[in-house]
Image (tube, coloured by chain):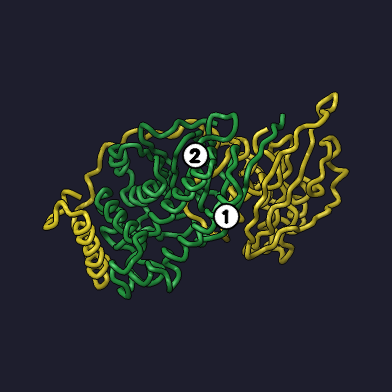
Chain colours: A green, B yellow
């Protein structure tokens, strides 16, 4: 029962990861995709903590004053401070060691923020139904044609090919997962300066992927107790997996369904 | 925001912004010399009563099924591998599904007839190129009188593992993953063959269990471009780019 489905499928390797863009009808003009790809590379050239010439690296090194930064970078750094306040310090872009040797690493927000913006750009160009997956963090709009929503697997910590659960979601939704199974114990608890490994994974879902990304990092630091904190964040819900494979979730997290 | 202390400039948005920006400088400079461990100002929140702490429905059943399949294939193979490494490894590999010519639609009735591996490793190993494809899935033209399952095969990217190159082929029957075959696997020393014999059947059962969920995308911890080629998202992308719809 194949249906005629037109879609744009693109995988861009940028920001050190693979970004999968899946657009269903109605499709935007081809220039829209080009613009988004240009945007992603611009983000890499501006915010990367792996490169020497970026504004973020130079600011972190003390080579630039904050007033010398572009408005875009200033806004992002100000938002990071807000998120540090909201998360009671569990997300802190200024307290984690960055690959460039500085203590400034806003990547936990920048990635989600950039992908959220990319989804909005495609929407402005006429796309209604799309899914962007940036190395495991997902921005969604609408739904695939003639089904109720995007079916999103939450990866099982033990295997890249196995799902812990699958949820169906539609509309403007961001989903971000923090865990150490891909890149080792790299998530630092800003309160202690030590790597945090209490949880196997923490997934946050909400209307803005940048915020969800930072919240997922914060929740991973907070541990199981962080669920009550997420409950208090309007519009955001979470699903966590502990090392004994027990799962916990907030009341508003989508029911599993496939 | 309005709760900031030392707000000399309340009411002037530009000055307020400058003040907030200045704090960014201070924050950076304040952190530059401090050891990360000295920053603990607030104790962690008291442990709250965990709500909704229960095992996810359906998870146990699925894990159980997976465990059984892994235990069966892996365990038996491992047992044999210990007795006679190379012989049992070959047996295990022979038990894997046959590779079929890429992109060719065949009927599923005689799968063994296509067993001659016409492998065309179209993928490059490292330095994965970006690829775009605008696809229009073919409309079923003139369906046969009796519905015959059509099998379409796509080779995945060649992945360099620590044991050597591995390439997986996904076979779709009516748009759903029906089989996973191994196009290329390391043929080095006996040890690596033994590892393959154990690992590959497990890989297959995991892909199939994932496909049963018919997912569009996967959320997980950030993976690198290198790890992407081993991810389920990669398989989903390749299937879509090749025109196979994940949902029949």
Which residue is at the front of the view, A175 or A244? Answer: A175
Judge left or right: residue B178 versus residue B64.
right
Residues tagged 2 and 1 counted as in contact (Cβ below 8 A): no
> In this picture, is B96 found above or below B39?
above
- Rendered image quadrant of residue A74: bottom left
**Position of residue B238 measured from the top left corner of the image (x, y, whole percent):** 66, 49
Q: Nearer the viewer, residue B171 or B69?
A: B171
| Residue drawn at (33%, 70%) of the image | A59
Q: Going 56% across and 48% down the picture, which residue do you hit?
A: A21
Disc 2 element: strand
Q: Which residue is mark 1?
A: A34
Chain under numbered label 2: A
Query: Does residue A179 show up?
Result: no
Q: Secondary structure at mark 1?
A: helix
C-alpha separation, residue under disc 2 versus residue under disc 1: 19 Å
- x and y percentages locating residue A103 in the rendered image: 32, 67
């Amino acid at each position: 029962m194949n249906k005629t489905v037109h879609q744009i499928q693109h995988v861009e390797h940028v920001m050190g990861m693979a970004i999968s863009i899946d657009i269903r009808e109605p499709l935007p003009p081809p220039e829209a995709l080009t613009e988004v790809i240009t945007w992603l590379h611009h983000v890499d050239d501006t915010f990367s903590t792996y490169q020497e010439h970026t504004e973020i690296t130079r600011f972190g090194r003390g080579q630039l004053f904050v007033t010398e930064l572009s408005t875009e970078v200033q806004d992002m750094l100000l938002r990071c401070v807000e998120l540090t306040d909201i998360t009671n310090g569990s997300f802190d872009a200024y307290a984690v060691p960055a690959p460039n040797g500085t203590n400034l690493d806003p990547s936990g927000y920048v990635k989600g923020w950039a992908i959220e913006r990319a989804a909005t750009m495609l929407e402005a160009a006429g796309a209604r139904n799309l899914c962007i997956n940036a190395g495991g963090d997902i921005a969604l709009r609408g739904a695939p044609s003639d089904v109720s929503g995007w079916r999103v697997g939450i990866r099982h910590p033990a295997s890249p090919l196995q799902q812990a659960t699958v949820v169906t979601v539609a509309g403007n939704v961001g989903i971000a997962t923090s865990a150490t199974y891909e890149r080792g114990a790299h998530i630092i608890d800003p309160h202690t300066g030590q790597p945090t490994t209490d949880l196997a994974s923490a997934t946050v879902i909400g209307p803005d992927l940048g915020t969800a990304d930072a919240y997922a990092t914060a929740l991973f630091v907070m541990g199981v107790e962080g669920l009550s904190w997420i409950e208090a964040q309007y519009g955001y819900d979470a699903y966590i997996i502990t090392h004994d494979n027990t799962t916990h979730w907030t009341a508003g997290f989508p029911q599993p369904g496939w | 925001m309005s709760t900031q202390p030392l707000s000399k400039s309340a009411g002037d948005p530009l000055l307020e912004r400058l003040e907030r920006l200045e704090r960014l400088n201070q924050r950076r400079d304040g952190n530059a010399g401090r050891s990360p461990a000295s920053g603990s100002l607030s104790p962690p929140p008291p442990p709250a009563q965990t709500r909704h702490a229960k095992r996810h429905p359906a998870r146990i059943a699925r894990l159980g099924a997976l465990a059984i399949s892994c235990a069966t294939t892996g365990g038996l193979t491992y047992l044999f591998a210990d007795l006679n490494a190379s012989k049992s490894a070959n047996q295990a590999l022979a038990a894997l599904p046959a590779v079929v010519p890429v992109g060719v639609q065949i009927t599923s009735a005689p799968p063994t007839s296509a067993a001659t591996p016409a492998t065309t490793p179209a993928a490059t190993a490292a330095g994965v190129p970006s690829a775009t494809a605008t696809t229009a899935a073919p409309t079923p033209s003139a369906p046969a009188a009796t519905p015959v399952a059509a099998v379409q095969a796509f080779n995945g990217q060649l992945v360099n593992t620590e044991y050597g190159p591995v390439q997986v082929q996904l076979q779709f029957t009516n748009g759903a993953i029906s089989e996973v075959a191994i196009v290329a696997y390391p043929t080095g020393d006996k040890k690596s063959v033994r590892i393959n014999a154990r690992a590959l059947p497990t890989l297959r059962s995991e892909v199939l269990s994932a496909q049963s969920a018919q997912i569009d995308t996967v959320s997980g911890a950030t993976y690198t471009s290198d790890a992407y080629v081993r991810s389920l998202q990669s398989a989903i992308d390749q299937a879509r780019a090749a025109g196979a719809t994940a949902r029949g």
